[in-house]
Each structure stands twice: as structure tokens, then as C-alpha cells.
Amino acid sequence: MRREIFRADRARALALLARAPFVHLATTTPDGAPVLRAIDAAVLEDGVFFHGAHAGEKATCLGRPAVVSAEEVVAHVPSWMADPVRACPATTLFRSVQVHGTLTAVEDPAVKARALEALMRRWQPEGRYQPIDAHDPLYRGELAGVRVFSVPLERVDGKWKLLQNRAPQEIERVLLGLWERGAPGDAEAIEAIRDANPGAPTPAFLAADGVRLHAALGPDDLAPVEALLAGEYWWEGEPRELVGPAHRAATAWVGARAPHGALVASARAVSDGRCAWIYDVVVARPWRGRGLGRRVMSLLLDHPAVRRTRFVRLATRDAQGLYARFGFVDAAARRRFATSSEMVLDRAAVAGEDPPRRAPA
Ligand SMILES: CC(C)(COP(=O)(O)OP(=O)(O)OC[C@H]1O[C@@H](n2cnc3c(N)ncnc32)[C@H](O)[C@@H]1OP(=O)(O)O)[C@@H](O)C(=O)NCCC(=O)NCCS
């Protein structure tokens, strides 16, 4: 890699390769013709594995140098975010990985079975098949009939191109521009840029005392948010394993971390562009009563997915005071909602599993 500032460490690079839905294999035939294929691969600790036919084109490339690559676009940054006149600062931010190795045929049936089983687990996590085992008579013939290839991890290059070559003030302008534009993925791009440029100034919309605010939370925050919400009344009796998917499905998910890195506040919203529903506003107990709930709510309301909606709705048992500060009122007090009532289909109640509560006498 020409510029080391863009290099990502090996673990992050391999994680990108492993989560890529599809990867590319580049190699050459013995007469030097280039070969480029899209492949479904399993990334294991000793290589990238995929399968093919014994007599296919890839088989003619065995023993030749090969590259496997994958990439994710983080954001297309228009020039105006960094410079009001010149076109040159326009750029695409991305993460990419390239693994270099020699295209190799896997002969050991146990290794073949391990690679194919890894692919099955990835794309068919529900199971409903007999696991692939080299000693299983069901698979012995099939394993002999399929060609499994590997590209050993001889060299792993990860490139994270996230403005590391730009001046801090320019980075700050891009962060502000992304927040203003608010296209899908821009909030996540803001966090990726901040992560790659720890010295960049914090933009005003993320300024806070004593905590680090985040315009987007992600997969690493799923377990912490489940812990934060444990015991909160609206999750009582609900399966905790739904907390993760509920947060992954959010159109806006913001939060705050303490200086030691722990997640101490979180809030999410689901928006269809006209109306956003807010869910799961929570602050860690030791952090309550210091203005953090208000700060996180204000960030969530300013999130592009929520900022542009006409209606923002939520339900709360007792924190009306917090929301009233932002202009929320009882829906029944608004003329538009006064003649309608909120209805709910509770499937557990319909199935007789959870009878409705009797009204207090
Ligand atoms: C509700 C919660 C998010 C508030 O967070 P927080 O950091 O303690 O709140 P803040 O310190 O920012 O307080 C902001 C304002 O809201 C008010 N407020 C906070 N919690 C309140 C509550 N339960 N009832 C009424 N008002 C409340 C505060 O009095 C404060 O008012 P002020 O600005 O006039 O002083 C937090 O207490 C919490 O996580 N509670 C448990 C989960 C919960 O109930 N979430 C809301 C479900 S909709």
C-alpha cells in the first residue's frame, strides 16, 4: 500500500472479508489470461475457501498467484462539503481488503468438509440439514466429487480510506455536511470517519460534556444496549433476544459512551419519512439526572431520519416531563389525533396467552 495512513489492521481487514456477502477472485490461466470471478467464500483462520468443478476454468489456475477482494462503500462525499468552489475534494470513502496467496486445491476431505460446513452455517443458520462431516457416508461421495479451493492468507491488506489525509478542519466540515445531507448511511459514515481520525474536532451536533455522543451505534453496541434495557418495564415479559434485531432495524440509533468506553445512553427511532416512532430511550442508572437523557433525545430528534418527519410519536409511562421539554404533548390533546384512538393487535392476547389486565376498581 502506497500510503500507510490508510492501512487497517489484519483482524479488521479479515472481518470485512468475512462479512462481505460475495467476494472477488482474480488470478490468471497458465497462458497468462486474466480471470476474475465473483465467489461465495468462507473465511477461516488459514485461508479463503470456495468450491467449484474439477474441470472448471478455476481448476486450470491452480498453483498460480491469486487475489481475493471485497469492499464496502462508506459514503460518496461531494466536493462542496469540503470546499465551496473546487471539485477536487470530491471523494468516495470506503473500506477494502485484498488477500494475496496461491490458488490451492484442498485434498483433505476433513478440511473440505470444514470449509463447506462453514458456508452452510453462514447462509443456512437455521440448520435443517445433516452437518457436513467427512466420515459421514451421506457426504463421502459428494466430497470426493466437489473441488474445494483455498487462497491461503499469505498477505492481507486492509485499506480504510476515511479522510485520514485531510486537515482536521476539513474533516469537521465533512462531518457537518454528512449530518446536514443525511442520506442513508451518512450517520454511520460520520462514526467511521471519527473512528479513523481520533484527532479531528468534535462537530457541534455531537458536543457533550463528560461523554462521547454517537450519531450512530452499531453491531458492537447490541450486547451493551441489551444490558442497559434489562429490567426496563416495557421489555418485561418480552424475549431479550428481540432487543438486538429491534435496534438493527432502527432507522436512527444514537447513544453516548462514558470516557472509559461503556455505553451509558441509547435511543432509537423507526421512521417512514412522514412519521417517526421513538423507542428505547434509556440512560444507565448512575448517569441519570445529569441532563444526558435530554442530550440524547435532542440528538435523536436532530437525526436526519427523524428531523425531516412531520410527526414524532412515542409512548411513555412516566417520563412525560422529559419529552414535554421538546414540545411533545398528549396525542389526545392534538386536534388531529383527538378523535382517533391508538389501537394495538396483541397476538399473545388473541392467542389467549396474555389476558388483558382488568381495569383498576
Ligand atoms: C427517562 C430517562 C431516559 C431520563 O434520562 P436522564 O438522563 O435521567 O434525564 P435528564 O437528566 O436529561 O432530565 C431531563 C429532564 O427530564 C426530566 N425527567 C427525567 N426523567 C423523568 C421521569 N421519569 N419523569 C418525568 N420527568 C423526567 C428531568 O426532571 C429533567 O427535567 P428538567 O430539564 O426540567 O430538569 C432515564 O431516567 C431512564 O433511562 N429511565 C429509565 C428508562 C425510561 O423510563 N425511559 C423512558 C421511557 S419512554
Image (cartoon, grey):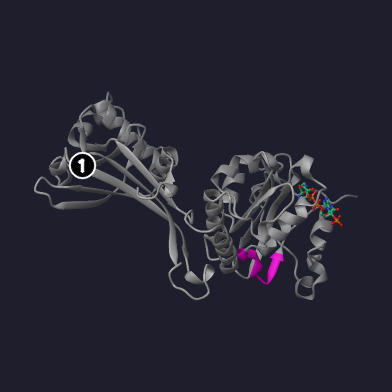
User: Could you tell me residue 291's position as x and y percent?
Assistant: 80, 52
Can you name the residue that lies furthest to the front here? 167
Q: Quadrant of residue 134?
A: top left
Q: Nearer the viewer, residue 7 or 110?
A: 7
Q: Which residue is mark 1?
A: 65
Q: Is residue 95 magenta?
A: no
Q: Residue at x 83, y 70 (%)?
A: 333
Establish whether ligand 1 lies closer than 8 Å to the Cβ of label 1. no
Q: Nearer the viewer, residue 188 or 340?
A: 188
Q: Is 262 rendered above or below residue 134?
A: below
Asked which secondary structure carries label 1, the reply is strand
Q: Is residue 74 visible?
A: yes
Left or right side of 267 for 187: left
Image location (x, y in percent) of residue 12: 45, 42
In this view, the residue farthest toward the right is 361
Location of residue 13 (image quadrant) = top left
Q: Visible in this render: residue 124?
A: no
* Magenta-highlighted residues: 304-312
Q: Amino acid at mark 1?
A: Pro
Front position in the image: 181 or 307: 181
Residue 336 position, x and y percent, is 75, 75
Q: Is residue 310 magenta?
A: yes
As displayed, is residue 312 above or below residue 133?
A: below
User: On the rendered structure, is 182 left or right of 279?
Assistant: left
| Residue 4 point in image, percent of width and height | 41, 46
Q: Quadrant of residue 279?
A: bottom right
**Which residue shows up at 54% across the image and 55% down it?**
188
Placement of 99 over or under 300, stated as above or below: above
